[in-house]
Amino acid sequence: GHVSAYAAFALLVHWAARPQHPRPVALALLLAVGLAIVDETLQGLVVPTRTGDVADVLLDGGAAALALLWASRRAQTRAATESAVPGP
């Protein structure tokens, strides 16, 4: 549920910000963690049977961080492979 949603959100922000922003990974992580904080705060304020949980913010932020780490490693591997293959 939340873990995959926050991972996908971070990857989408990173993808969208990459052409314009000098630090798209930092921006994506900041926005994902900010969204998790807002989500948990609203749960505690609006839903009577729910409370906000710091552990959920950490879990969601961790999922975003792992997704961004995966994307960064994948891009590095792809760049290394493309530069190692001789052109025609």
Image (cartoon, rainbow, N blue to C red):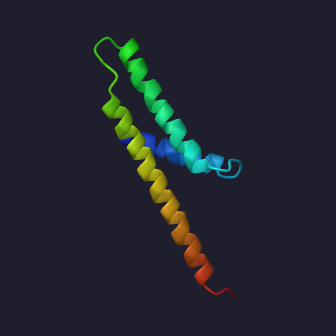
Q: Residue furthest left?
A: 49
In the image, is 18 to the left or to the right of 44?
right
In the image, is 88 to the left or to the right of 40?
right
Residue lying at 35% horizontally and 14% vertically, measured from the top left:
47
> Residue 65 placed where, x, y %?
44, 48
Residue lying at 44% horizontally and 45% vertically, measured from the top left:
64
Q: Nearer the viewer, residue 58 or 88?
A: 58
> Residue 88 placed where, x, y %?
69, 88
- With respect to residue 33, does 10 lie above or below? below
Callout count? 0
Q: Nearer the viewer, residue 38 or 2?
A: 38
> Residue 49 placed where, x, y %?
28, 14
In the image, is 33 to the left or to the right of 44?
right
Q: Nearer the viewer, residue 72 or 86?
A: 72
Q: Is residue 2 visible?
A: no
- With respect to residue 75, does 86 lie above or below? below
In the image, is 75 to the left or to the right of 62?
right
Which quarter of the image is occupied by the N terminus? top left
The quadrant holding residue 75 is: bottom right
> Residue 43 placed where, x, y %?
38, 19
Residue lying at 47% horizontally and 36% vertically, measured from the top left:
33
Q: Is residue 58 visible?
A: yes
Residue lying at 60% horizontally and 84% vertically, measured from the top left:
85
